[in-house]
């Protein structure tokens, strides 16, 4: 089919889908409003106020300047309501959307914390009872990222492109240095490698990592942990922040390249992953030698787009961060970590993009409720709006 013919078909389908979606939205809105939110006008598509319930830690709300989100919600016809997860959820409803950052709570529940278990159980019961509730993001999807070893397995199995990979990894379960060395050799993991806590969230310890250069320092491994090949990447980490259909890439400092002579001379480097990649970080470990500077690979933005689509297919999350480095000698893109509801530092218009994503999810739910004859215009991963930013560019733009 010629491009012009294809465009004509797509345009016709979009018009038909829009009419069907609008009709579905009206019926869906009336149904929801009858549950006590507000009276919908016969001609309107949405309720006067869709209710977005949220539970986000105060520290994160302060970082995001949450009052800006309240203003955007108000201007877009939404009501933002803080949810107390310790109280009866039915009495705090009805809700159309539940936005949360409950990763620590989930981790504590999985570790046997009784209070956390009760909270998560109540939430799951409420969500199951209200099948039309939009949850950002579903607890089961988030759980897939709680264990680094398992999440790396998901990525390894789900990657569909030859120029994208996740570095070799293995879970370390033994304290015996000889056993660890044998496991690393069988898996093909060479020195240096990065040692990361097995559990990806739930405490500050989840970000305490180390680079191990030789067998004698395998004793530094702190169980339970995951060993992951260190990829030489010229001290540049790309933070890919995703919000539904939108993503933005921010360039951050990272570790310099390490070579065989470093394995003979260096001891274990202990670091916090949050600190080493901050825009203001000035670690001596991020300073490249003059010989390595020419090795820097210019990023290909289309590959970032492929990564985003692939990760969305694997984990089905609206709010997700992807840590990517570009391998020096191959130019391949390595996904080294994936994070739930990240900090979004340097992401422009985060709240507006979040509201846009919520609107699309509500529209899809309306179509799901009235699926007969309803055609969505585009799926989430088909049309990504994106941007790119490096610390150097940001400096120039503020001068």
Image (cartoon, helix red, strand yellow):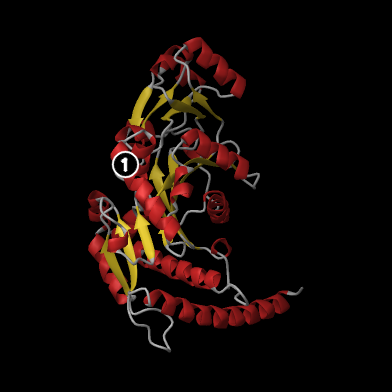
Residue 165: x and y in percent read 59, 40
Residue 398: x and y in percent read 29, 59
Examine the rendering and report whether any part of residue 292 can be seen: no
Determine the secondary structure under disc 1: helix
Residue at 59 percent across and 39 percent down: it is 156
Residue 145: x and y in percent read 46, 42
Outermost residue on the bottom side: it is: 43
Residue closest to the eye, 319 or 146 = 146
Residue closest to the eye, 165 or 35 = 35
Q: How many marks?
A: 1
Residue at 29 percent across and 44 percent down: it is 280
Residue closest to the eye, 122 or 371 = 122
Instruction: Tell me where residue 64 sits by quadrant.
Output: bottom left
Residue 164: x and y in percent read 59, 44
Residue closest to the eye, 355 or 144 = 144
Residue at 72 percent across and 79 percent down: it is 5
> Circle 1 is placed at which residue position?
116
């Amino acid at each position: 089919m010629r491009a012009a013919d294809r465009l004509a078909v797509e345009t016709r389908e979009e018009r038909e889908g829009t009419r069907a979606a609008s009709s579905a939205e009206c019926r869906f809105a009336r149904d929801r409003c009858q549950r006590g939110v507000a009276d919908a006008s016969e001609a309107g598509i949405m309720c006067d106020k869709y209710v977005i319930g949220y539970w986000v830690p105060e520290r994160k709300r302060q970082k995001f300047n949450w009052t800006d989100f309240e203003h955007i919600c108000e201007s877009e016809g939404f009501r933002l309501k803080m949810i107390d997860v310790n109280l009866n959820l039915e009495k705090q409803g009805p809700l159309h959307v539940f936005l949360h950052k409950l990763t620590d709570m989930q981790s504590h529940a999985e570790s046997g914390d009784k209070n956390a278990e009760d909270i998560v159980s109540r939430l799951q019961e409420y969500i199951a009872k209200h099948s039309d509730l939009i949850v950002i993001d579903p607890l089961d999807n988030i759980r897939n990222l709680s264990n680094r070893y398992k999440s790396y397995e998901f990525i390894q199995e789900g990657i569909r492109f030859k120029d994208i990979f996740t570095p070799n990894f293995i879970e370390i379960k033994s304290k015996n240095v000889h056993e660890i060395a044998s496991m690393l050799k069988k898996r093909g993991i060479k020195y240096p490698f990065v040692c990361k806590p097995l559990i990806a969230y739930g405490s500050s310890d989840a970000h305490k990592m180390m680079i191990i250069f030789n067998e004698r320092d395998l004793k530094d491994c702190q169980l339970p942990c995951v060993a992951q090949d260190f990829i030489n990447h010229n001290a540049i980490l790309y933070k890919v922040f995703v919000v539904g259909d939108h993503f933005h890439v921010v360039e951050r400092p990272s570790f310099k390249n390490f070579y065989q002579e470093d394995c003979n001379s260096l001891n274990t480097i202990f670091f916090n992953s949050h600190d080493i990649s901050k825009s203001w970080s000035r670690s001596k470990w991020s300073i490249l030698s003059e010989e390595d500077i020419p090795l820097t690979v210019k990023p290909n933005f289309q590959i970032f787009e492929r990564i985003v689509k692939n990760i969305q297919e694997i984990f089905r999350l609206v709010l997700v961060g992807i840590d990517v480095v570009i391998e020096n000698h191959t130019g391949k893109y390595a996904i080294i970590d994936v994070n739930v509801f990240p900090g979004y530092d340097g992401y422009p218009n985060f709240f507006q993009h979040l509201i846009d994503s919520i609107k699309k999810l509500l529209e899809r739910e309306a179509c799901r409720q009235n699926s007969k004859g309803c055609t969505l215009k585009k799926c989430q991963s088909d049309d990504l709006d994106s941007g790119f930013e490096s610390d150097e560019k940001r400096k120039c733009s503020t001068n």
